[in-house]
Image: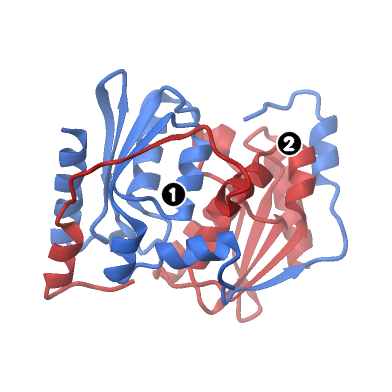
Chain colours: A red, B blue
Amino acid sequence: MSMELAVEEAKKGMKRNEGGPFGAVIKRNGKIIAIAHNTVLKEKDPTCHAEINAIKKACKRLKRFDLSDCEIYSTCEPCPMCLSAILWARIKTLHYSSTRKDAKEAGFDDSEFYDVFSGKKKSKLKVIKQKTKNSLFHECMEKEDKVLY
Amino acid sequence: MSMELAVEEAKKGMKRNEGGPFGAVIKRNGKIIAIAHNTVLKEKDPTCHAEINAIKKACKRLKRFDLSDCEIYSTCEPCPMCLSAILWARIKTLHYSSTRKDAKEAGFDDSEFYDVFSGKKKSKLKVIKQKTKNSLFHECMEKEDKVLY
């Protein structure tokens, strides 16, 4: 039922040309708390994937950044950006339908990005490590009223 | 100069307890078009990392999801979520200061997530692949007015 809702949500976004054919649903205690689709085209923002949009909605609704009591349903295996967001949100369970291979065949780069992370492929991004260090982590660790997340 | 600005921005956010000690700056043609810090605590949203916030700001400003003519300066080596966002935004060059090892020592999970992607470590996330396929990619490929991104 949750996956069917995610698929319907993806269709809605696709029909309106708001983004790619992706939808996501977040559930907590058996209750749906967020439904979202990809809005990359509508928002002109490459981070507006269905899972990111759903996580943002769920956090806004629950007023917390920790979704460790939640499950996410995604119409496709999440790209590395969304999988990392799911990990940062501490979501418990991920359900997905299509695979990164299906996404690749449809022209989406998810699979290529996975290959960058596993070391199989080099990305076109030029990466420059600066020689000088900054003192931010040191200042953070010294901070008495710091909040961990 | 750009990295110094990113460090100052990170300090501002940290002092206000808006998020972790991270800042980012995006430049286009030598001109700064976005400055942002981590706002995970302020927004109660685990996706509000400095790089994601900066990409969102830059896209809003340029009114496009493609930042292939831009460079990003980050006070720390981006986590997999932010590195993927940088790849999706097609940013040309990434400059960073602290490393994922420094982040780990300060208590941030970036390094652990990299190990999940490289296969060195298993995440706690339970992943369930659904058996039934959906027709979304097929419908998308058949769509005559589709926009690629």
Circle 1 SS class: helix
Q: Name the spot of residue A10 as percent of width and height, x first.
A: 71, 48
The image quarter in which residue A106 lies: top right
Judging by the rendered image, the residue that carries numbered circle 1 is B82
Q: Name the spot of residue A92 as percent of width and height, x first.
A: 58, 76
Q: Residue furthest top?
A: B29
Q: In this rendering, is residue A26 above or below A51?
A: below
Q: In this rendering, is residue A77 above or below B143?
A: below
- In the rendered structure, the answer to whether residue B18 lies left or right of residue B64 reads left
Residue A29 visible:
yes
- In the rendered structure, the answer to whether residue B135 lies left or right of residue A45 reads right
Residue A58 visible:
no
Distance between the alpha carbons at the discs numbered 1 and 2: 29 Å
Q: Residue at x 79, y 60 (%)?
A: A4
Q: In this rendering, is residue B141 above or below B46?
A: above
In the image, A73 versus B102, the foreground residue is B102
Circle 2 SS class: helix
In front: label 1 or label 2? 1
